[in-house]
Amino acid sequence: MSQDKQLKVEHTAIPGLLVLHLPVHADQRGWFKENWQRQKMVSAGLPDFHPVQNNVSFNADLGTTRGLHAEPWDKYVSVLSGEIFGAWVDLRPGATFGTVFTVRMGPDQAVFVPRGVANAFQTLSDNTVYSYLVTAHWTEASRAEYSYVNLADPQLQIDWPINLDRAIVSQADRDHPYLNAAKPVQPKKVAVLGGNGQLGRAFAQLAKIDPRLVVLTRDDVDLQRSGFTDSLELSGYSHVINAAAMTAVDLAETRAGRAEAWQVNAVAVRQLAAACAEQGVTLVQLSTDYVFDGERDNVDEDEMICPLGVYGQSKAAGEQAVLAHAQNYVVRTSWVIGQGNNFVLTMLRLAEQGIDPKVVDDQIGRLTFASELASGIIHLINSGSSPGIYHLQGNGEPASWYQIARRVFELSGHDPARVQPTTTREYAFDKEFLAPRPKHSTFNMDKLRATGFASRPEADLLTQFLEVASEKSQYVTE
């Protein structure tokens, strides 16, 4: 055992499996170490993994061998006394399934074991004390998520220091399946709130190919209900994507609408963020261009928020509640188009009904298709991009609502000259409650692009959207 080394985190051939080299301070009396020190270890590169329980295994005899077990939680394993030979096998589906890593460990090392990686050890001395922190409490339901692989599987080629024929091994461990029959450990799930909205429906489509996604509606999680987080059980989830919101911007200017907007967009979001933080789950919060006053175009994530109306104010408050927890994301977007009630479908309906609309020409932005928005959010999760604020809107030239309406008419086979321009002031003339709108709703998306995500061209998406809406009547408008 080396002494007084620097704390160091070392990566291995198994993604996420980390070896920690721990400083040990020794003298004639014995030794001392910081076995777990959150601030220092996270700074050195360990995930901030929120352990909830510490277990200790005492092993009286040399050659005691336990494993290989993969549990549905993260573990931090270390040796308090003696020495072990540790072995790990990746049982997560993917290219690294079956990858093996081994190391001899004394008190001066520890290993972080991510969910789905099978863990085993063999004691190399008598009276060995083995400790492990875990990120979830064991329940009867969690047993079904366990997976195992046989210690003696020749495919793994684990070179046990003490032959397994002479080692102390339980019969259950000897009977575990070989790798070719081992059950892959599925990744944690991702909850999506607001399943009946345009973005929620886009996630429901993604869920057909991504089994992690669990799309929940207001019947499942109602942000207007007092104490809704009391029954929000998030064990087994890595992320919550909050696509639920009060988005009726004009109604939000009324007394009843103001109360609803603040409850759903701010108060409930603060409660949701606190519940996610308590359970170690990352929250992805959807926000809006309405947190800005729209006086500047092409704004980036560092632009000072300056909401004009109640809706924007409530969403800005929700942003701050989410960002109070360092692991969370805020994704700002604008002018969302998907399955549901939206501007493009309204213009299509007017075109087909022979109605010639007047549309405002002094609000400039970009359409954001819900399918691209959902894909971009999943990209942020999958790529492990740094938490914080991201701007995500359509990949197209800025245009006014009037210009977009003309495109909808033209692409659906109607005369675009039927659409007439108007101003926001003229549009608001006879309306009792009309929320102030940003003049510019265009974002700088360099930060998102730097993560490797690029949305498909808006023009192509609009054409495809209208073809589906016109020919198949697939998009609902209730």
Image (spheres, grey):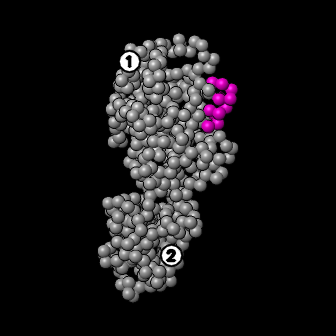
Rate crowding at label 2 as few (under 14), some (14 to 19) or many (20 or more) other CA atoms within 10 Å. many
Q: Which residue is mark 1?
A: 416
* Residue at horizontal 42 percent and vertical 59 percent from the top: 7
Helix, strand or loop at mark 1: helix
Task: For marks 2 and 1, give the CA distance.
Answer: 78 Å
* 310 versus 232 height, above or below: above
Q: Nearer the viewer, residue 366 or 278?
A: 366
Q: Of label 2 and label 1, which has the lower sequence position?
A: 2
Give the side of residue 298 with respect to residue 309, left or right: left
Question: In x, y percent, where is residue 36?
Answer: 51, 62
Q: Percent x, y for residue 117?
A: 42, 65
Can you say whether 329 is above or below 261 in the image?
Answer: below
In-front residue for pair 158/104: 158
Q: 110 and 170: which one is in front?
A: 170
Neighbours of disc 1 within 10 Å: few (<14), some (14-19), many (20+) = some
Q: What main secondary structure does the magenta stretch of the protein show? A: helix
Residue lying at the far bottom of the rendered structure: 166
Reading the image, the residue beneath label 2 is 129
In the structure shown, which secondary structural element does the residue marked by tag 2 occupy? strand
- Give the magenta-colored segment's residue range: 253-264
- Examine the image and state in which quarter residue 96 appears: bottom left
Judge by depth and name the residue closer to the eye, 41 or 244: 244
- Residue 184's disc is none
**What residue is at 62 percent from the left and 20 percent from the top?**
433
Question: From the image, which quarter does the C terminus lie in?
Answer: top right
List x then y, in percent, for residue 248: 58, 29
Residue at image point 48% right, 78% down:
128
Q: Does residue 107 appear anywhere in the picture?
A: no
The residue at 42%/47% (across/down) is 206
Residue 258 lies in the magenta-colored region = yes
Query: Given the image, on which type of amino acid does mark 1 rest?
Result: Pro
Q: Are marks 2 and 1 in contact (CB under 8 Å)?
A: no
